[in-house]
Image: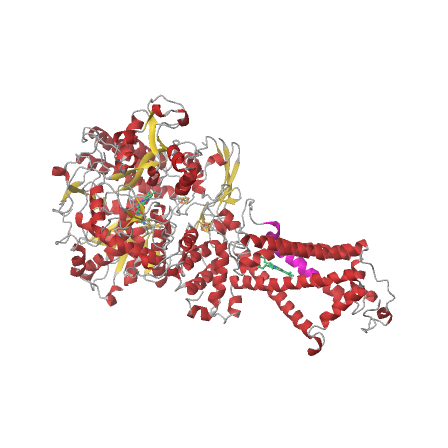
């Protein structure tokens, strides 16, 4: 392994509001006529991938786009509900690029890179223009102007939305732009094709090795640069709000080829999800955070109280958020709301048949504004809730519980979104991102599109310009052939396993019983150490005791899942290792040993104001830590308070 | 570029599994014939020709109501049809234009129906292996082809019967429409054929008169409700009107010709005496 | 609950395929339909048999991956609900549930109940976009869009591309899918410049793969997003207009 040494984020010098402008000017350009001489691989067709591929195609590069989905439109971004932030200040309520920048750094609990965040806020305004131009049907006011809503944590209305389907509409916009480039021939789509390896030679990314999910064929693709936009790894917990297919395989395999994995322990738990109903639960469903505007959260004071909620008088209810945080009440940030719900359930006051939730009660709101108004605001959510639980939230309080929702960690990238491997770019949720230790609502969509539409198309040119005249590495090169052989071997080995467990059984055991239990909403040293040894045992079990009865090389979902789970196991170990090393609480990472007397997260800025980026050294769990120190020149480090 | 793995044949990765089932013609003909080369265009044509035939069926039904006024009025109506356009235009001129229009409409309607049916069959080579449970498609919409064919066969029968008098034999008097109709319809089997065919026609129209608004793109939230009402009313009107003829004949309300028919005596010659003989 | 599951099993696109019946005890009414299939698959695997291949991803009714004919109805008995959002409480103890893949020439079976829907992508590639290269758009508030127009466009844009409309249609027509995308783009002011070219290209691509609409309305009944067939009428109207050349030249005129 090469020595990485000091990690340089390559943030341009100069005043924060001029960094991006001057950087754009200073970067090298590729002459339009030369662009078609370059091959670029984009893996992933979510917001980040589709927008990047379409934009690169428009510029004239030869782009190959890969997705394991059957169509680019199915990427997990489609599921985002709430909205997308932009510092348009259309509401004249004091928003600005600087305020969005400030809110994001603070919301991220001071663990993000200032330069990146400022740029994100800066291009956010262009995103809305771009998407509206593509025909994204954003909500409008009667005047025909764009409508906004306010969203978790922010004091301004800066969230643009398209009903409860913002992610869907933004993704369709990007997918349609990509479809146009596919038609034009500048982008070639490889659907149902999974990236299984990154090929690095002479210190730079040269291509990828993929498996055709319909034929099982393993092939190589080379390019001048490789862009990963493969989403987050929330499914390491088995139960999460992520789509079932979301996985870490692409980023993990790049990690094994030398890319640094940064801050894997920063995972976000969303407070308002529907609790699991039984052991067969396969995924969790998010109920929009906006519900907390009108719902009051409570549990019975007496853990033994078995009365139905409407029989429990006010005096016997504990509205614990209102009690503990009189200023913010039910509207405290996601991490605070989540941890408090966990405490209630852990202390036995959970409600519902499995005592695994808390009430979100609309009774007062219905009495105050009437059922009709509540219906107008939340009808689709109430309907969805009823479909899933068979309970009518107009009559019975909702049952909610936190669930894994987003992962702030990911592959380390510099200001140009390039990883430590030259020629390997990482976008969207897959990179360690601009959100620090906690992401604010409605800013993941913003980041994915910022990366894809407005950052990568500039920064990649700077790298490519230096490669003019170079041909991509031939796919008959031993580097490709060796990787192809390794993958075929892995497939063979998995198919030969004749154990007693299904992949899902083991996966659930790891995700729910180990990672969620010990590296979930709250973590402690002992639990993390146990988790690491549990995970190691699970890895051994995996490679000896699972059984894949489907032996075919064609569409074989058990095999696909087994490969993804094998990577999740390794990632889980690194997550725990990262969580163990970070002896502080910040954002989504809460170490029980480090809290204020009244139970709030206690940061340690002196020792941990850095990005922890891990380098693979050949064996799982043996990664080496590299630190990128974070400097805060514009936003003052301060303890967050929501009292 | 030679250095990379070749793409799978096309710039989009259909991977050979999904191939177009239908080839678009390499050359598009000019409007409006080009329209007819496409399925949406054909449906549009079916809608337009449907309206033409609906117009015919309606007028035809109303015209036949003259039957209830008696032979003279009825035959007068028939002659008036032949004399459309008055003295300006040769006898039966306008009628032939209308006939040609209707023949073309029917031909296009049938041709579209046939080609689209073939297209639809080919779009699902393997049908559902378990029973399907339909929720919107109704009897009328599911049987358009059958009712269409019944109507077609009936039209042929109807022309043979009353235009060329093939079945009436010597009873057929060219020009004496009243005589022909009443004689034909007083035979029970024939009356039943007429009734069944008109039920089929009404069923066809129950869907068709609604469906055409979709095919022609005439829709607006303001009258979407009314489309169903219109189609039901139209089909019902045609049904009631057209069924009444065979029923009334069978029931004897419209009686067979009791005249001494000079027309018959003169061997079917079309003379003025034939008309208005009861006066 | 105990149910009997009769599922279409097919090894590959060219293999014949047939129904197989499984006895499924221990079904909880709170399970989703797909969770029930997960359980069946785990049991099949433990019995040394090949699990059922079915597509799914978000399990929230938005990605459009899932979809199968359940007891003769696309996406099963609950209206406006995708397969992944269907719950077992909609069935009764002792029920037989028959599961079959979408069937259409354009949706060949890949394996079991998974089909290839890439023909939909071909339709979108033909023109289902507004050509706005990155960076070219004006300020979003420069184009005023009346709320009812934006709402109508959103109604159409809600389509998740699941293919149930095609599966439900006795003619395997893709009118609802195509017209939903066309209406989304054709209703918006931004979409006017390419309106007629887009309509022509998308309709003609659609016709290469799918059957012809006879206005049964089955598609709407099956659609998990309850997309209105009014959009089909709008598409037909636009298409006939698009065929008139001067319309294309004077594309701003409605
Ligand atoms: C329920 C829910 C609601 C949300 N709501 C909001 C919200 O309101 N606002 C907000 O800002 N954010 C929201 N988020 C977060 C946001 O949706 C995601 O962070 C964001 O969409 C991620 O986009 P992406 O492009 O990075 O990745 P994804 O959309 O996950 O796309 C990943 C792509 O990579 C491909 N891929 C992955 N691995 C491979 C491989 N090995 N080979 C080939 N292809 C591969 C996949 O096929 C897919 O195309 C929400 C998230 C969830 C779960
Ligand atoms: C001559 C034999 C006929 C045949 C074979 C026939 C067949 C068909 C078929 C297959 C359809 C398409 C069904 C659909 O799209 O839902 C149809 C539609 C229709 N038919 Fe006929 N039909 C015939 C006669 C008639 C007659 C005599 C009339 C009018 C009185 C008529 C009126 C209509 C109408 C209005 C439609 C709806 C068109 C549309 O949806 O655009 N048809 N016919
Ligand atoms: S129109 Fe409805 S049924 Fe058809 S693909 Fe779209 S969402 Fe599915
Ligand atoms: S799994 Fe996504 S819509 Fe059903």
Residue ID at (86%, 72%): B266
Instruction: Pick the residue in front: A442 or A190.
Output: A442
Q: Is residue A7 left or right of residue B253?
A: left
Quarter location, residue A25: bottom left
* Quarter that holds the C terminus of chain A: top left
Residue ID at (42%, 65%): C197
Instruction: Pick the residue in front: A381 or A426.
Output: A381
How did the renderer colour the structure?
A: secondary structure
The main secondary structure of the magenta stretch is helix
Instruction: Pick the residue in front: C149 or C44.
Output: C149
Instruction: Report whether residue A221 is seen.
Output: no
Residue A329 sits above or below residue A198 on the image: above
Q: Position of residue B128 (x, y in %)?
A: 54, 48
User: Magenta includes B139?
Assistant: yes
Tally of numbered tags:
0
Q: Position of residue B121 (x, y in %)?
A: 55, 56
Query: Quadrant location of ligand 4?
Result: top left
**Magenta residues (range):** B138-154
Residue A481 sits above or below residue A639 on the image: below
């Amino acid at each position: 392994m090469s020595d990485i040494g000091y990690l340089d984020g390559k943030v341009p010098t100069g005043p924060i509001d001029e960094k991006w402008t001057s950087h754009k000017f200073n970067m090298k350009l590729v002459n339009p006529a030369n662009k078609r001489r370059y091959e670029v691989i984009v893996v992933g067709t979510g917001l980040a991938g589709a927008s990047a591929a379409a934009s690169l195609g428009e510029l004239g590069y030869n782009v190959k786009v890969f997705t394991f989905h059957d169509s680019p439109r199915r990427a997990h971004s489609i599921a985002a509900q709430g909205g997308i932030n932009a510092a348009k200040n259309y509401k004249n309520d004091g928003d600005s690029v600087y305020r969005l920048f400030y809110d994001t750094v603070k919301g991220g609990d001071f663990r993000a890179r200032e330069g990146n965040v400022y740029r994100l806020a800066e291009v956010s305004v262009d995103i809305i223009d771009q998407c509206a131009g593509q025909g994204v049907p954003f909500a409008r006011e009667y005047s025909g102007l764009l409508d906004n809503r306010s969203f978790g944590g922010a004091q301004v209305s800066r969230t643009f939305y398209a009903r409860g389907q913002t992610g869907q509409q933004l993704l369709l916009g990007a997918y349609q732009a990509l479809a146009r480039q596919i038609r034009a021939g500048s982008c070639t789509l490889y659907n149902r094709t999974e990236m299984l390896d990154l090929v690095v030679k002479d210190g730079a990314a040269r291509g990828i090795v993929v498996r055709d999910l319909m034929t099982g064929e393993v092939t190589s693709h080379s390019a001048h640069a490789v862009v990963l936009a493969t989403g987050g790894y929330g499914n390491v917990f088995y139960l999460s709000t992520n789509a079932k297919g979301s996985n870490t395989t692409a980023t993990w395999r790049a990690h094994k080829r030398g890319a640094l994995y940064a801050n894997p322990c920063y995972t976000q738990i969303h407070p308002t999800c529907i609790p699991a109903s039984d052991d067969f639960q396969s995924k969790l469903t998010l109920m929009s955070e906006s519900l907390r505007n009108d719902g009051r959260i409570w549990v019975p004071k007496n853990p033994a109280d078995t009365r139905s909620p409407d029989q429990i008088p006010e005096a016997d209810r504990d509205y614990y958020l209102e009690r503990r945080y009189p200023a913010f009440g039910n509207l405290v940030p996601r991490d605070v709301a989540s941890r408090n719900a966990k405490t209630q359930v852990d202390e036995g006051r959970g409600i519902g048949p499995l005592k695994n939730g808390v009430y979100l009660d609309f009774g007062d709101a219905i009495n105050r504004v009437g059922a009709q108004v509540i219906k107008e605001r939340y009808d689709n959510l109430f309907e969805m809730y009823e479909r899933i639980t068979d309970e009518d939230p107009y009559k019975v309080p909702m049952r909610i519980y936190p669930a894994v929702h987003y992962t702030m960690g990911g592959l380390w990238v510099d200001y140009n979104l390039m990883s430590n491997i030259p020629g390997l770019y990482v976008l969207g949720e897959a990179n360690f991102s601009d959100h620090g230790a906690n992401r604010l609502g409605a800013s993941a969509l913003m980041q994915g599109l910022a990366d894809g539409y407005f950052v990568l198309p500039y920064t990649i040119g700077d790298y490519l310009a230096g490669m003019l005249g170079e041909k991509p590495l031939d796919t008959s090169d031993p580097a490709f052939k060796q990787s192809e052989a390794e993958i075929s071997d892995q497939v063979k080995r998995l198919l030969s396993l004749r154990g007693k467990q299904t992949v899902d059984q083991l996966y659930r055991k790891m995700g729910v019983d180990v990672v969620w239990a010990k590296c979930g909403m709250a973590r402690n040293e002992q639990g993390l150490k146990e988790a690491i040894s549990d995970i190691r045992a699970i890895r051994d079990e995996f490679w000896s005791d699972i059984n894949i009865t489907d032996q075919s090389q064609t569409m074989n979902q058990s095999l696909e899942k087994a490969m993804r789970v094998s990577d999740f196991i390794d990632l889980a170990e690194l997550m725990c290792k990262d969580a163990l090393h970070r002896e502080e609480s910040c954002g989504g990472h809460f170490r029980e040993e480090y809290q204020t007397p009244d139970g709030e997260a206690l940061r340690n800025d002196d020792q941990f104001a850095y990005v922890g980026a891990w380098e693979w050294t050949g064996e799982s769990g043996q990664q080496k830590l590299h630190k990128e120190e974070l400097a805060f020149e514009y936003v003052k480090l301060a303890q967050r308070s929501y009292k | 570029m030679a250095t990379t793995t070749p793409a799978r044949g096309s710039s989009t990765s259909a991977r050979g599994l999904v191939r177009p089932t239908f080839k678009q013609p390499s050359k598009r003909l000019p409007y409006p014939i080009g329209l007819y080369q496409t399925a949406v265009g054909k449906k549009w044509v079916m809608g337009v020709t449907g309206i033409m035939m609906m117009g015919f069926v309606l007028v035809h039904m109303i015209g036949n109501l003259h039957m209830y006024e008696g032979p003279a009025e009825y035959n007068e109506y028939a002659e008036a049809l032949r004399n459309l356009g008055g003295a300006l235009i040769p006898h039966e001129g306008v009628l032939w234009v209308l006939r040609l229009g209707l023949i073309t409409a029917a031909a296009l309607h049938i041709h579209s129906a046939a080609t689209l049916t073939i297209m639809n069959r080919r779009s699902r080579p393997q049908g559902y292996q378990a029973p399907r449970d339909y929720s919107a498609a109704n009897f009328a919409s599911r049987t358009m082809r059958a009712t269409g064919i019944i109507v077609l066969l009936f039209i042929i029968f109807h022309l043979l019967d009353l235009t060329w008098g093939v079945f009436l034999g010597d009873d057929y008097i060219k020009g004496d429409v009243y005589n022909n109709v009443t004689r034909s319809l007083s035979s029970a089997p024939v009356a039943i054929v007429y009734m069944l065919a008109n039920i089929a026609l009404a069923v066809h129209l129950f869907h068709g008169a609604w469906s055409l608004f979709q095919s022609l793109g005439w829709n607006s939230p303001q009258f979407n409700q009314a489309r169903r009402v219109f189609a039901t009313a139209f089909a019902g009107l045609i049904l009631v009107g057209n069924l009444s003829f065979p029923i009334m004949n069978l029931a004897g309300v419209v009686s067979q010709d009791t005249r001494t028919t000079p027309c018959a005596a003169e061997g079917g010659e079309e003379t003025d005496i034939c008309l208005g003989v009861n006066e | 609950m105990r149910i009997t599951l009769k599922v279409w099993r097919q090894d590959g696109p060219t293999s014949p395929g047939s129904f197989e019946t499984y006895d499924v005890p221990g079904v909880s009414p709170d399970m989703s339909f797909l969770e029930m299939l997960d359980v069946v698959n785990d049991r099949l695997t433990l019995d040394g048999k090949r699990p059922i291949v079915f597509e799914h991803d978000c399990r929230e009714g938005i990605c459009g991956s899932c979809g199968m004919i359940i007891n003769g109805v696309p996406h099963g008995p609950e209206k406006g609900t995708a397969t992944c959002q269907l719950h077992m409480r909609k069935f009764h103890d002792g029920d037989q549930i028959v599961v079959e893949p979408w069937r259409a020439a354009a949706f060949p079976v890949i394996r079991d109940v998974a089909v290839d829907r890439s023909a939909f992508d071909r339709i979108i590639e033909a023109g289902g976009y507004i050509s706005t290269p990155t960076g070219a758009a004006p300020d979003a508030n420069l184009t005023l869009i009346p709320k009812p127009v934006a709402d109508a466009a959103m109604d159409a844009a809600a389509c998740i591309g699941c293919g149930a409309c095609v599966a439900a249609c006795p003619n395997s027509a893709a009118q609802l899918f195509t017209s939903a995308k066309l209406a989304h783009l054709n209703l918006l002011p931004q979409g006017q410049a390419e309106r007629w070219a887009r309509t022509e290209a998308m309709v003609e691509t659609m016709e290469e793969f799918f059957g012809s609409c006879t206005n049964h309305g089955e598609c709407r009944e099956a659609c998990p997003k309850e997309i209105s067939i009014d959009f089909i009428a709008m598409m037909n109207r636009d298409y006939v207009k698009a065929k008139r050349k001067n319309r294309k030249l004077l594309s701003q005129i409605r």
